[in-house]
Image: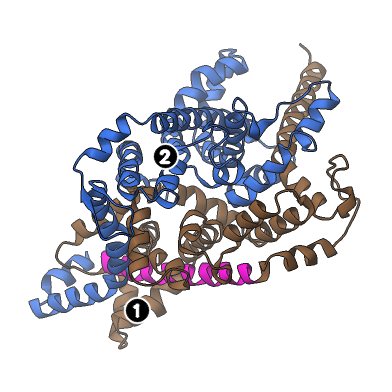
Chain colours: A brown, B blue
Amino acid sequence: MNRGGHRLQAIAGSLLLHAFLIAGAIAVVLPFLWMITTSLKPIQETFSPPYLVPVWFRWENYVAAWKAAPFGRYYLNSFIMAVFITAGQVITSAMAAYAFDRLEFPFKNVLFLLFLGTLMIPFHLQLIPSYLLVQRLGWLNTYAALIVPRLASAFGIFLMRQYFRTIPRELDEAAMIDGCSPFGVLFRVLLPIARPAVATLGLFAFLFAWNDFLWPLIVTTSPEKLTIQVGLAMFSGKYGTQWVYLMAGTVTATLPVLALFVLAQRWIIQGLTMGGLKE
Amino acid sequence: MRAVRTITDRPSSLRASQAWAALFLLLPALLVFGLFNIYPTLYAVWLSLLDWDGLSAAKVFVGAGNYRELLHDADFWNSVRVTALYTVSVTVLSLAAGLAVALALNRRLFARTVYRTIYFTPVITATVAAGVVWTLLFDPVNGVINVGLRKIGISGPRWLSDPLWALPAVILVGVWKRLGFNMVVYLAGLQAISPEYYEAALVDGAGPWHRFRHITWPLLTPTTVLLTIMTVIDSFQAFDHVFVMTSGGPLGATDVLPLFLYRQAFRLFHLGYAAAVGWVIFLVVFVATILQWRLSGEGGWRRS
């Protein structure tokens, strides 16, 4: 074949590739597009044929949906839960990782394996005993039930330890000579250097907490304590046929995470594929 | 060097103070893991031997009774079958689709990162929200899927209320959610393959299929094995979108094991029985996790 033939072939090949990728991408974003266009439709147009690019913009649907269910309250609950879990996991993981990487103590390896071992126990097995414990503590329908059981993360400890390993010990020792306590070394020297690991763990923890469903579903029943995901599932059970409002609620529930993803994709993709290895 | 010396040279009082510091630093994680991981796991052993509704004072010890009952419970076996079908389908389909997209993206390409972002978006989307949207997409009359099918002259099924089509619908959502993750890991695997192999194959005049069959696929085996295990572990525990879309119905057609467990525990209050189901889920996840760790070095974290 001559040179021109090869070029034509290459162009045809790349067009075919794009056709394949675009078709797939449309299938993947279809639910998102449809969710948005439906949420902005006038109520009387609910059953008009589906379309993908918004032609109506009834923002008042959102107001109506937020009035039909306390989405604002759900939002606040999810936000409080996710922020505390994220901060908690970063702090407890950094503390434990410091001990595992920098200190010598009895049963160190056993303890580390025990921590990692918690990763292979499916949550479904712990679900009922954890529920009974939370119930006995009188924590049902409290933030404590949503937050405390999630305050430590074996993935987080592992991640932070791996990062601390790369930081030379000379830095700690210099800080110690300047009169820094081990605590000061951890929070003033190591953590600032380990920012990439903190970001990865933080995003992973936040996403996981925001999207979590089963645990919040069983420990909360009163409307003031529902998280956004549980609230949405309840709303869907109650107003399942009112698509316009339902989609407004769904957009509400997914928007923060989508925004976060757009802002910090690189970290999120990295954190999730690494964190996924945790399971 | 220096680290080793500081530890061994220090007097024992300093070593003791290190142990105290370690205890203090580990305490928060220890408390949380102890109370909400280790204790519940141990308690689940005892619970699975009881007949107890969680409320009454009477806990009846039944030994292996719950497990024996499981063996004769047709609903349980239905759940096992549904879960196996779901897990195998989601795993095979999401790996195949993830690999196809990764292969297409593994080159210099216009809008490459845009594609990658789009395909990854479902991974970060809450499964509950996704379940709600897909329920509407699958609506028999006004859902976008059946409307589309009607346009090309096909009358679509009633999807979520059809015992035959509900499971494929739920599987489709599982694949949609998982595809992007597998794509990213496959892309990393593809990028680790040295271009020299392909150059040599080109010299030998090997076509694209031959290059894939004899270079790419064999060299991706470790990635494929790892992803298979990870996707099995993940999809075996699927709950959220099934709960929202079908709650296990119609007629148990989508009643995956986690839903079966949830219903036994929190609807029927058969706590002991549900704990026994928990151990069945544990068995599968445990074996798969051990395999994963074995195959991917220390703790499965090599990539980090």
Which quadrant would the N terminus of chain B be assigned to in this image? bottom left
Which amino acid type corresponds to the residue marked 1 in the rendered image? Val
Residue furthest left as drawn: B12
Give, as a single range, the part of the protein colored magenta.
A73-100
The residue that disc 2 covers is B233
Tell which of B177 and A25 is nearer to you.
B177
Residue at 16 percent across and 61 percent down: it is A107
- Total marks drawn? 2
Q: Position of residue A124 (x, y in %)?
A: 39, 48
In which chain is the residue bearing label 2? Answer: B
Residue A28 vs A240, above or below: the answer is above
Magenta stretch prevailing secondary structure: helix
Q: Is residue A73 visible to us here?
A: yes
Residues at marks 2 and 1 on the same chain: no
Q: Which mark is residue B244?
A: none
- For this view, does A108 lie left or right of residue B141? left
Residue B164 vs B67, above or below: the answer is above
Q: Position of residue B168 (x, y in %)?
A: 60, 29
Residue B150: quadrant of the picture = top right
Tell which of B37 and B254 is nearer to you.
B254
Q: Which mark is residue A185?
A: 1
